[in-house]
């Protein structure tokens, strides 16, 4: 039975290999270990192997888990966030990757102001057009970016997407490429840096890296190697 250490070594090797194929520095790619459903004692095994950034997708579960773990960790919220949970998200998370509406952004900005902090965020974009997925449509984010960037307590670091699941990971490449091209378009039109691209999970993160991912969200390959995040 592979250990968490074994799984992480395999994931890191795959990240390095994908970066090499793309002519990229693997140090420019941050691993976000998706720890939803993973108990604190197993998260500690990943911490012992040098993982410092974790992703959670449910506020209530995170409220129970995060206080049990070292304070030096960087927590990313990666699930769909309701506006009535914005205050909790601001209190719990370093980065919120799934800002998918102007309304949510405004609420996060208000809560961050009340908390006296600035929150790094990513704008979730639905580049595949799937009706079951959250996120700005590409044209919506182009139209909204000026207003979003003016919110004083949010730092927009880049974009995030969830590609459709395919048996063949190569089929996800157009979605990852579309996010990178959308980011490039936004940077050119608005003249602001958007360095972060969060895309790719266990099934397809190598393709995402080849297409420019700077953050990869990997859960199954680390914590549940027989199951699919």
Image (cartoon, rainbow, N blue to C red):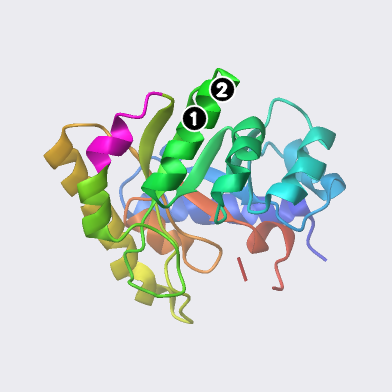
Estimate the x, y position of residue 218 in percent, counting from the top left: 59, 56
- Which label sits on residue 114? 2
- Which label sits on residue 155? none
Residue drawn at the location 57% of the way across and 55% of the way down: 79
Q: Does the magenta stretch include residue 141?
A: no
> Which segment is the magenta one?
145-152
Tag 2 and tag 1, C-beta contact below 8 Å: yes
Estimate the x, y position of residue 54 in percent, counting from the top left: 64, 43
Front in this rendered view, residue 36 or 80: 80
Image vertical order of residue 175 relative to residue 122, above or below: below
Q: Name the residue at the left extreme.
A: 189
Q: Name the residue under label 1.
A: 110
Estimate the x, y position of residue 187 in percent, counting from the top left: 19, 39
Estimate the x, y position of residue 20 in percent, counting from the top left: 38, 50
Q: In this view, does 123 lie to the left or right of 114?
A: left
Residue 15 in sight in this render: yes
Residue drawn at the location 52% of the way across and 41% of the way down: 96
């Amino acid at each position: 039975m592979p250990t968490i250490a074994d799984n992480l070594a395999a994931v890191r090797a795959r990240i390095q290999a994908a970066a090499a194929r793309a002519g990229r520095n693997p140090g420019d790619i941050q691993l976000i270990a998706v720890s939803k459903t993973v108990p604190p004692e197993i998260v500690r095994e990943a911490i012992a192997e040098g993982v410092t950034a974790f992703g959670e997708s449910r506020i209530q579960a995170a409220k129970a888990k995060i206080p049990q773990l070292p304070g030096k960790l960087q927590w990313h919220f990666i699930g769909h966030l309701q506006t009535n949970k914005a205050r909790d998200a601001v209190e719990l998370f370093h980065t919120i990757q799934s800002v998918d509406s102007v309304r949510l952004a405004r609420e996060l900005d208000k809560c961050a102001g009340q908390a006296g902090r600035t929150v790094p965020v990513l704008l979730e974009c639905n580049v595949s057009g799937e009706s079951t997925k959250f996120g700005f449509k590409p044209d919506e984010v182009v139209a909204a970016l000026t207003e979003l960037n003016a919110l004083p307590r949010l730092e927009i670091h880049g974009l995030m997407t969830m590609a459709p699941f395919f048996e063949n990971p190569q089929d996800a490449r157009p979605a990852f490429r579309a996010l990178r091209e959308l980011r490039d378009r936004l940077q050119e039109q608005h003249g602001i840096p958007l360095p972060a691209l969060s895309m790719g999970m266990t099934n397809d993160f190598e393709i995402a890296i080849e297409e420019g991912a700077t953050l990869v969200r990997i859960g199954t390959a680390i914590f549940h190697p027989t199951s699919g995040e």
